Amino acid sequence: MQSQSQSEEPESFMDSSLPTFIRNAINHNEDDYSNFEDTQAPSDFEASSYGIGNDGIISRPMGGTIDSLTKIWMDERNAPEILPYEHALVEPLILAIETQAENIMESMESQKENKFESMLYQTEIERVKYLLKSYLRCRLWKIEKYTLHLLRQPDLKELLSSQEIGYARRYQELIESHNHDSFLHQLPRSQHKQDEISVDMNMVVEPNLDAPVFCRVLSDIGHVEINNDSVLFEPNDIYILRYSDVRDYLKEKKVKLI
């Protein structure tokens, strides 16, 4: 177990008018924001603060929507188990992407002189779409790996979206049907079970909650008992620990996985 204290490493569609960061780039206002070339760096992407308005439009000054998306993406990729689906964050983003992609295409067709601005909008959209796709694909991979385990969870509706629940059920049905048609039908009926759990065997694949993870402390937690040792969790400290040791703090958003 190793601790290191360091500063945060920050890692970014379309409104009826240009967003502030694009207007400043066009006007060469380097005091407030970096130029467009700098915005391509991953550090600027994670640090940018976009929010979603009531009309489904994403704009810069409305909060840390993209920061939050980056965080849940990193947490999901590094956690050995599937984390609760972030309905309130992901669904509005998906809707906003669809809305603004249509606006961009209409703008490009009606105003040929605004192609440069449309390209900037498209770049921002593609960056957010990448995060969303990676986040959802990571969750699908875990659903396929831990299907039976997930379907037996009492808080299934909190863990998965309605689409993910439907996918998990259909996937499990296909696996069971394939196994039966391939070889199980040749075995005695008593050996047809695909979810048997006994002292010596567990056919249900479960996540390894003791897997090692890197985490960064986000708030002053204080002393934490880990393996009979008292460890001080202070903001920006980085540790490598068992996932089970930080699982509760991750759910409370007091740490993030890196």
Image (cartoon, helix red, strand yellow):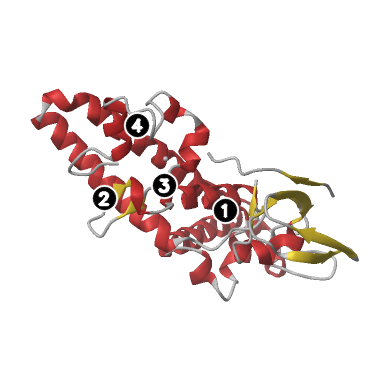
Residue 112 figure quarter? top left
Q: Is residue 65 left or right of residue 13?
A: right
Residue 168 as seen in the image, left or right of residue 101: right
At horizontal 41% and vertical 58% (from top left) the residue drawn is: 89
- What residue did someone put label 4 on? 123
Gap in Å between the C-alphas at discs 1 and 4?
32 Å
| Residue, far right | 228
Q: CA distance from mark 3 to mark 4?
A: 16 Å
Judge depth for marks 3 and 1 and give the one in front: 3
Give the quarter of the figure containing the C terminus: top right
**Residue drawn at point x = 60 percent, y = 54 percent:** 179
Q: Which residue is mark 1?
A: 144
Q: Which residue is mark 2?
A: 57
Q: Amino acid at mark 4?
A: Thr
Kind of residue sitting beneath label 1: Glu
User: Quick one: SS at disc 4?
Assistant: helix
At 25% from the left edge and 60% from the top edge, which residue is drawn?
54
